[in-house]
Amino acid sequence: MKKRIGILTAGGDCPGLNAAIRGVTRAAYEMFDAEIIGIHDGYRGLIEGDYQIMKRSDFSGILTQGGTILGTARTPFRNMRVIGEDKVDKVAAMKKTYKNLKLDCLVTLGGNGTHKTANLLSEEGLNVIGLPKTIDNDLYGTDFTFGFHTAMDIATEVIDRIHTTAASHGRCMVIEIMGNKAGWLTLYSGVAGGADVILIPEIPYDISKVAKVVEARAKSNKGFTIIAVAEGAMDKEEAKLKKKEREAKRAAEHFSSSAYVAKQLQELVGVEARAVVPGHIQRGGSPNAYDRVLSTQFGVHAAELIRDGVFGVTVALKGNTIGHNALKDIAGVPKLVPEDDQMINIAKRIGISFGD
Ligand code: F6P
C-alpha cells in the first residue's frame, strides 16, 4: 500500500538539509511504494496548506546543495497555540492539512523549536518523525546534529585566515561565532583554529582575565591574540541580568558580543583590537563530507522507521550508532556545554583561556 509522506524543513537552515531529504526519500522509494509531499517553508506551509507533490527526480542532484529545496521559516513554538490577529488556529490548521493530504506521516527536519512543535503534533495524534539539524549542535539526545561539522569547518577557516592578518599587524582579533545559547560551535572551531581565548555563553567571562592573556601575548614574541567569542557570550556582570535586560543592554549599546569584547580590550590593554563577524556564512554552501554522510544515515533511518511504523521519535547519533529518541523525552531540553565538558578540559590543558 502506498505511504504518503509529508516532509518539511523548519527553523534556521544549515548545510545537509538537502542531503537528509534525499536520504529519507531515496530510501523510502527503494523500500516501499512512497508518495512524497514537500511542504514549503516549514510549519508555515503546513498551517497554510502550501505544498507540492514531489517527483523522484526532484531529489536528484541535491546531495551537495546547501540550504533547503523546500524552503524554511521560523514559526516560533511559543505562538503555536496562540490565536493571533489573523484568527488562525495554527494547530487545528496543521492537523487539517495533514488530514486533507491523507498523510501517513510527517517528517520534520529542524532544531529545538522544530522538535517542540513536532512533539506537540505527535501529542495531537499525528505520526511524526524528527531529524536533528542545526549548526548549534544543541539538540538533546544526539551526539551531533547535521550542519554542525560544516559550520565548524567554515568557522575554523575564518579563524585560520584571521591568524595571518592578526600576526602581520600584531593585533587582537575577536571572531564572533554563531550560537546564542550554546557554545559548541565556538568551542570546537576555537580549538580547531588554535584560538588563544574561547568565550561561550555557558561560562560567563571576566574581561580582566581575558585582558591578562592579551597583554601577555602582546608582550611576547607572538604579539597577537585570537579570541573566538560566541554570539551569546556574556561577562559575569551581564550574566546576573535577566535575559530581557541583557538583550536590552546590548541593543542600547549597539554591541555584538565581539564588538563588546574588542572595545573593552582596546580600553583595558591599549592594543589594537578588531571584531570580525562571519555571520550567516557559517550556514551557507555545500555540506562537508561528514555532514553528507550523517544526513544520509539520519535520512535512511527515518525511512526505516516509517517502514516499521515507529512514530513520535527523532533520529539520533549515539556513539557510532544511529538510533532514535522519543520526541517527548528530548523536546524542549537544550543541550548546552557542561562546565566539565571533556573538550573544555582539553582546551584548558593546552592553555586556552575561557576568561573564567
Ligand atoms: O540556530 C542557528 C543559528 O544560526 C544560531 O546560531 C543563530 O543565533 C541564529 O540561528 C540566527 O538566526 P537567524 O538566521 O534567524 O538570523
Image (tube, rainbow, N blue to C red):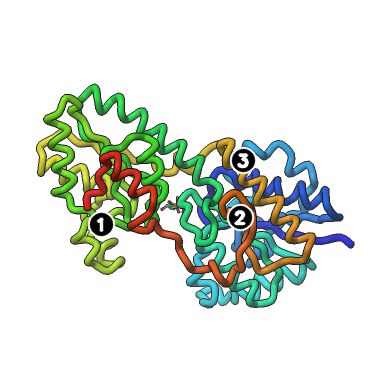
- 7 relative to 268 in the view: left or right: right
Query: Mark 1 is on which residue type?
Result: Pro
How crowded pointer 3 is (Cα within 10 Å; few <14, some 14-19, many 20+) is rated as many
Q: Vertical placement of 56 versus 169: above or below? A: below
Name which of mark 3 and mark 2 comes first in the sequence: 2
Q: Which residue is mark 3?
A: 292
In the image, what residue occupies the spot 66% across and 48% down?
297
Q: Position of residue 45 (x, y in %)?
A: 64, 61
In the image, what residue occupies the spot 73% across and 66% down?
310
Query: Mark 3 is on which residue type?
Result: Arg
The residue carrying mark 3 has its beta carbon less than 8 Å from ligand 1: no
Q: Which residue is mark 1?
A: 204
Mark 3 to mark 2 CA distance (whole Å) = 16 Å
User: To which quarter of the image does residue 116 belong?
Assistant: bottom right
Q: Vertical placement of 351 versus 54: above or below? A: above
Instruction: Determine which of the numbered discs, if any, sits on residue 9 in the image.
Output: 2
Query: Which residue of the protein is positioned furthest toward the front in this rendering?
Result: 349
Task: Judge by depth and name the residue closer to the eye, 276 or 73.
Answer: 276
Q: Position of residue 20 (x, y in %)?
A: 65, 48
Q: Quadrant of the N terminus?
A: bottom right
Mark 1 to mark 3 CA distance (whole Å) = 34 Å
